[in-house]
Every structure is written in C-alpha cells, then in structure tokens.
C-alpha cells in the first residue's frame, strides 16, 4: 500500500469516529478544533433507529461539512473498533492523526460529500477529498452504532489513477 494511501486511511479512520455533542450522553466539552486533546467519549444510551439516524447525519455534517473534529469525535466510544490497518482502535490514536489534517483551519484539504445513507445500525458516507494526495481520492466511511454511539468503523479509500483503464469517472 502506498504511503499516501496508508496515511490517508489512518486519517479518515480517525475522523470517522467523531461527532458533535447531542442530547443523550454526548458530552460537548470541546469545540476548539485547535485543541489536540481527544474529547470525552460517547457513553452508549438506548435510542430509537430514528434517533440513531439523526445522530449519524449530525456526525456527517459536523465532521465533513463544518469540520469541527473535536465535536465529531464525541459521538464515538473511547475504544471503538477501527478496521483500518494503518491505525489502532480507539479515539486517541485516530484523533491525533485526523485533527491536524482534517480540521476546519486546514484549507488545503477539500471535502465534497457525494452520497450518504443510514439503515440502523449502520451509516455510510461516500466523499471526494482533494488536497491530501496528488490526485483526488474517493473515500467511503462506514459506521456501526450501538444505541447513541459509534462503536465500529470501516473505510475504503481509492486515489484516482493518473492513467485509468476504465472510461468511467471515479466520482
């Protein structure tokens, strides 16, 4: 795996396990994205599938649109399972990688959400990222919820090849 793909995978695994504070056990102790200390983790509480969907879309907006990484991470349990081979489980390692690269103040990195959906207890978001690798990169992040919190994350990352055999666009 190329180093840029490995670093990007690590970055996005970290990012995907964050979220803004919501009612129901999601503490919002930090909103300053320049703070490099991970936020307080989410404590799972029983919620309806409808509420899980609301939390998922809030997470997506906070992480990928507003890019307030510390708020986004309040939706993750402390020891969430991260399936990216370039990082370890949990908030601390993921946050340390993602926060400086994906924070709102890093204007070199551009994110465009292409698709998103939620079917309890899973949500996924497909997006384009520019400014991290030499070529635009497609990413799909998948989150699994336990009640009100994200407990597991997967990602699929593909940088657009310079000379593609396929005539179909990546995005």
Image (cartoon, rainbow, N blue to C red):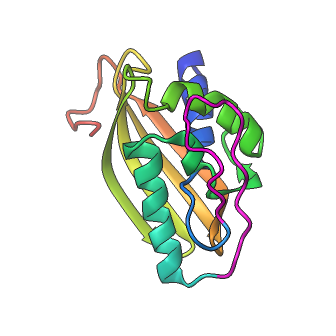
Taking the spot 44% from the left edge, 26% from the top edge, the residue there is 105
Depicted 97 relative to depicted 17: above or below = above
Q: Is residue 114 above or below residue 35?
A: below
Q: Quadrant of residue 98?
A: top right
Percent from the top left, x then y, of residue 8? 54, 28
Residue under the image location 58 percent in, 32 percent down? 99
Q: Is residue 68 in sight in this rendering?
A: yes
Q: Which residue lies furthest to the bottom in this view?
A: 48
36 left or right, relative to 20: right
Answer whether residue 153 is magenta in the image. Answer: no
How many tags in the picture? 0
Q: What stretch is highlighted in magenta?
A: 26-46
- From the top left corner, tell me how far across and down residue 15 is, in percent: 57, 41
Residue occupying image coordinates x 43% and y 19%? 133
Comparing 136 with 165, the one in front is 136
Q: Which of 22 and 73 is in front in this view?
A: 22
Q: Residue 134: horizontal and vertical position, in percent?
A: 38, 14
Q: In this view, does 12 lie to the left or right of 138?
A: right
Q: Which corner quadrant holds the C terminus?
A: top left
Q: Main secondary structure of the magenta part?
A: loop
Is 31 contained in the magenta span? yes
């Amino acid at each position: 795996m190329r180093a840029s793909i490995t670093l990007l995978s690590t970055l996005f695994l970290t990012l995907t396990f964050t979220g803004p504070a919501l009612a129901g056990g999601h503490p919002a102790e930090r909103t300053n994205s320049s703070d490099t200390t991970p936020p307080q983790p989410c404590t799972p509480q029983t919620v309806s599938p409808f509420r899980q969907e609301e939390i998922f879309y809030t997470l997506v907006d906070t992480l990928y649109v507003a890019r307030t990484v510390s708020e986004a991470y309040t939706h993750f349990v402390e020891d969430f399972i991260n399936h990216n081979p370039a990082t370890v489980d949990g908030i601390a390692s993921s946050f340390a990688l993602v926060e400086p690269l994906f924070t709102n103040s890093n204007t070199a990195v551009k994110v465009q959400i292409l698709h998103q959906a939620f079917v309890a207890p899973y949500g996924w978001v497909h997006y384009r990222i520019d400014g991290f690798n030499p070529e635009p990169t497609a990413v799909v992040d998948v989150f699994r919820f336990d009640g009100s919190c994200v407990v597991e994350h997967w990602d699929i990352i593909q940088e657009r090849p310079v000379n593609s055999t396929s005539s179909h666009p990546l995005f």
